[in-house]
Amino acid sequence: MTTSTTAAPASTLTVSLPLQLVSEPNAREYWRLRARRARMQRATVTAFMRCQHLPVLPVVVTLTRTAPRAFDSDNLAAAFKAVRDGVADAYMLNDRDPRLTWRYSQRREEAYGIEISITPRRRRPCVAVTPKATVENPR
């Protein structure tokens, strides 16, 4: 397990964990094994992320899988479900919260693992809205 802060955007947090993700939709296994794996992945990610200095919301979370073979896009998102829930738990939010934007990627390497990168999302500046003057139609 390694933690590093990259220099690209301000205060990006990048964490690597040695978790092997399984293609959940294609896994033909007993439901208790699947539930145990999901519970372990979620708890591991939550505990590890709570020890980090998390960037201030809103953020963009990029979940990257490293493995010798690639998943297709729908299996990749499904495989990251427990990890996604764990990151959201670290923020004490639901994973559907609009302040969390999720991105998925993968790269080929010999060793299995995941990488979680959290980057602050730029906030839109507040703009004062003034009502438009109404012009009556002269008829």
Image: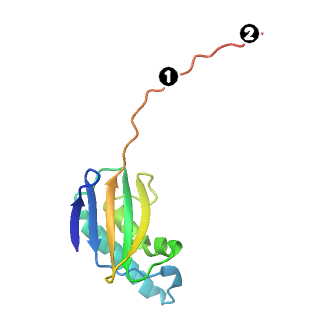
- Residue 32, percent across and down? 44, 86
- Residue 114, percent across and down? 34, 73
Q: Is residue 19 left or right of residue 72?
A: left
Residue at 32% of width from left, 79% of height from top? 19
Mark 1 vs 2, N-terminal side: 1
Residue at 27% of width from left, 59% of height from top? 13
Quadrant placement of the C terminus: top right
* Neighbour tally class for label 2: few under 14, some 14-19, many 20 plus, Cα within 10 Å: few
Q: Which residue is mark 2?
A: 138
Q: Is residue 102 above or below residue 35?
A: above
**Element at badge 1?**
loop
Numbered label attached to residue 40: none
Residue 47 in view, yes or no: no
Q: How many numbered marks appear?
A: 2
Q: Is residue 82 left or right of residue 28?
A: left
- Residue 106, percent across and down? 41, 72
Numbered label attached to residue 130: 1
- Residue 138, percent across and down? 74, 9
Residue 118 in view, yes or no: yes
Depth order, front residue of 109/72: 109
Q: Is residue 98 above or below residue 130?
A: below
Q: CA distance from mark 1 to mark 2?
A: 24 Å
Residue at 44% of width from left, 27% of height from top? 128
